Image (spheres, helix red, strand yellow):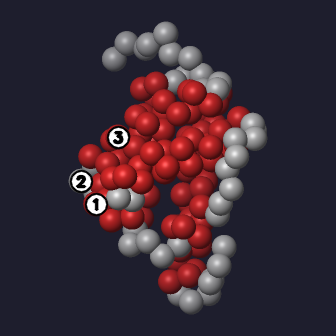
Amino acid sequence: MMENTTLSDINTQEDIRRLIDAFYTLVRQDALLGPVFAVRIPDGHWPTHLDTMTRFWTAALLAQPAGYRGNPGAKHLYLPIEKEHFQRWLQLFGHTVDEMFVGDNANEIKLRALKMGELFQAKMAMARQGGLSIL
C-alpha cells in the first residue's frame, strides 16, 4: 500500500468529529460491536452520542474545553462486553485513525484509547468480582 502523504494530523475539534463519525459508522455495522451499541443507543440518540464522544476526545486529546462532562468508566461498568469487544473496538478505532490521519496526535489518540480500554477492563473485572461499586 502506498503511503498517503495528503493526510494531516488531528488538530481541531472538526477533525475529531470527522474521526468519530467515521469510526461509529463502522462500529454500528460491525457484527460484534453493532448489537451491543444498538441495545444501548437507539437510532434517534446517535447524534447525542456522537456529540458527546466528540467533546470527550476534544478535551482528552487537544486539551480544549469542549463542554464534556461525564464519567465514561461508570457508563461502561456493567455492559455485557468482554475482552474481544475491547479488542475489536481498538482495532476499528486504530484503523479509522490510520485511514484518516497521520502525526503525533493521531498516534496519541490511539495510545489513549488503548490505555482507556485497559483501565475499563480492569475496573469491569473488579466490579464483576464485587470489589468495585463506582468509578
Badge 3 amino acid? Thr
Relative image position of residue 4 (x, y in whole percent): 44, 13
From the viewer's perspective, is the residue at label 1 or at label 2 nearer?
Answer: 1
Residues marked 2 and 3 touching at CB (< 8 Å) = no
Looking at the picture, which amino acid does disc 1 mark?
Pro
Q: Position of residue 62 (x, y in %)?
A: 71, 35
Residue holding disc 1: 35
For the residues marked 2 and 3, what is the alpha-carbon distance in whole angstroms? 12 Å
Q: To which residue does mark 2 refer? A: 31
Residue type at mark 2 is Ala
Q: Nearer the viewer, residue 83 or 8?
A: 8
Which residue is the extreme one toward the top? 5
Coordinates of residue 87 in the picture (x, y in percent): 41, 54
Name the residue at 28% across, 49% down. Answer: 30
At x 70% / y 46%, what residue is drawn? 67
Left or right of 118 on screen, residue 3: left
User: How much space separates mark 1 and mark 2, taking CA atoms?
Assistant: 7 Å
Tell me which numbered mark, 2 or 3, is placed earlier along the sequence: 3
Q: Nearer the viewer, mark 2 or mark 3?
A: 3
Q: Residues within 10 Å of mark 2 (few under 14, many from 20)?
A: few
Q: Position of residue 129 (x, y in %)?
A: 53, 87
Q: Which residue is mark 3?
A: 25
SS at badge 2? loop
Question: Relative to 2, does residue 25 appear above or below in the rendering?
Answer: below
Residue shown at 33% from the left, 41% from the top: 26
